[in-house]
Amino acid sequence: MSFLTGRRPDHSRVLNFIDHFRQADCGLTEGGVAYLGPTLRNVTVGGCEWGGAAPCGGSGDCCSICSEDERCGAWTYTHTNSSCMLKARSGARAADSGAVSGARGTLSTRAAWVSLPQHFKRAGWIALSSGKIFHTEEGGSGNTNPNLNGPGMPPNQDPPSWTPGLSMQRVNDVANMWDCKIGLPPSDPDACAVDADMSGAIASPLTTKQFCDRVIADDAVLKLRLAAMHTPFFLAVGFRKPHLPFRFPAPFLALVEGDVAAHPTLSPTVPPIAHHDAVPQPHIYTPVANATAHEWRRHYRAAIAWVDSQIGRVLHELEARGLAPTTLVALHSDHGWSLGEHGEWQKFSNFEHGTRVPLIMRAPWVRESVGTRSSVLAELIDIFPTMAELAGAPLDPQTAASLDGTSLAPVLRAPADAALARALKHRALSQYMRCPRDAAQPQKANDCLFTDRSQIAFMGYTVRTHTHRFTQWAAWNGSSLRSVWQQPRWPDIGEELYSHVGDDGSDFDRYENKNCNASEPNVAAALRVLLHEAVANGSAKARVDLVLVP
């Protein structure tokens, strides 16, 4: 969501799959409290594409429903049954661990916010999409009841962002990420390595499901041909791999090799809450079998090779239409991925592997940038202002002031200027939440994906400078939606400090293997100040200079 809004999660209040930035703002809420005032009506927050199995919408949607009803003065949302009770007034209060309550809010707080594609649409571009841009599954899908048409992430891939009729709305109905099993022969319909040629043409299409990313690429090519007749255009293409499950044409396995991580378990110097247990590794201190790790890493790389070929199809079409010299292209992912390093698999962490993503921008008219790399500390929130500046769609003062990101255009114009890169951005900030069920094992069952933001237990904030990464885990205030520094509730909550001196991004095993927080207290203290300032104001200007002694 950050790259689409140019704003940090703390500002958009989008902290997991439940909420979205177009919901109303009800200010401070009361977690663990139910209002007992007179109930006007009860609404079941539904419309989730996962059949309502997850509490989609949450308190944010209940707040929105109340704010749209002139009679409503307060509300209570109950997690256990996804019930939104609209109240004339709050009345007495009762303790209820599964509830969150609040007063009537306003839809005006973020009414002026526009998304990245919406900005270009307003500037006269036609805005098209294919694939997963806003998150799928959790948003409503056009229910005739307006109260059911917006729980979870923006419904229908957020209609205000796109030219009518030119977005892929129900992505899972068109390009689903079908499940598969690693290790089955390609002839098996459930195999991850599917019996198909390099183009993705399946040998048995009547019994084997299509590849989601080929469907997305097909759609993107058609939309690009349409867009070519209506320039200027903004086309967003959201490919789904290499996200699990790793499903791809079997011939791509021959292009890659498998191996194992050099440090396949978590160092005892790292607080366990930094870790999230995920398949295929059930325990942080016991490495997964080499054969399993080998195949998972090999399948991951084959999935990358496959999606890279589909990205190439779209870029080839851009070239064929003669549009490449005048088109800005930005390529990035939404999160990183761990493959057994530190005993961590998948995403769900604040480690470098989970937070660092590729970012490639091509602006042919900025000749100085062609074929170059920069060491600038870039964040996904920077994509919005950077694209607006480079494409000649300037931000109005109100929008520019509301964005948390910084335009990276100066770096593209002077990529060799290391001093400029360091002056432009002094740090990169990320965050990830934890909701452990067991104090004795905070690394297990600690996800918050469908936990209402008022019920989050801990938030981990991490700041990356040119030389270090510092992470602090803090208790979460579910009413103010802010961290409570220095008030841990469990003894395992802690801090992490890792040196990245000499890190050029090419060695995935060398860094963050030992927590240096205790051995380098001065560096940790300086970065703690930087982190707290960054979280408090979101500004890229906060700076702490570090004097490092080799």
Image (cartoon, rainbow, N blue to C red):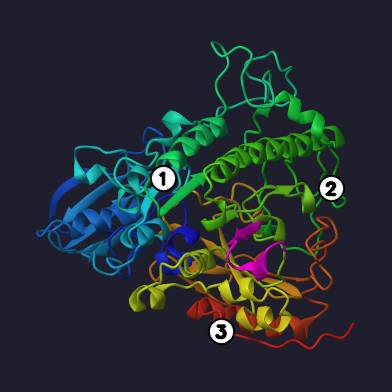
Name the residue nearer the viewer: 275 or 549: 549
- 88 w.r.t. 235: above or below: below
Instruction: Look at the image and say whether residue 417 sits in the magenta stretch.
Output: no
Displayed quadrant of residue 513: bottom right
Q: Is residue 361 magenta?
A: yes
Q: Residue at x 75, y 83 (%)?
A: 523
**Which of the two marks, 3 or 2, is nearer to us in this view?**
3
Mark 3, other Cα within 10 Å: few <14 / some 14–19 / many ≥20: some
Image point (60%, 60%), residue name? 361
The nearer-to-camera label among 1 and 2 is 1
Image position of 111 (left or right of 540): left
Q: Which residue is mark 3?
A: 541
Mark 1, residue position: 227
Q: Are marks 3 and 2 in contact (CB under 8 Å)?
A: no
Residue 95 seen in render: no
- Callout 2, which amino acid? Ala
Magenta-tinted stretch: 357-371
Callout 3: helix, strand or loop?
loop
Q: Is 528 displayed left or right of 27 in the figure?
A: right
Element class at badge 1: helix
Disc 1: CA contacts within 10 A as few (<14), some (14-19) or many (>=20): some
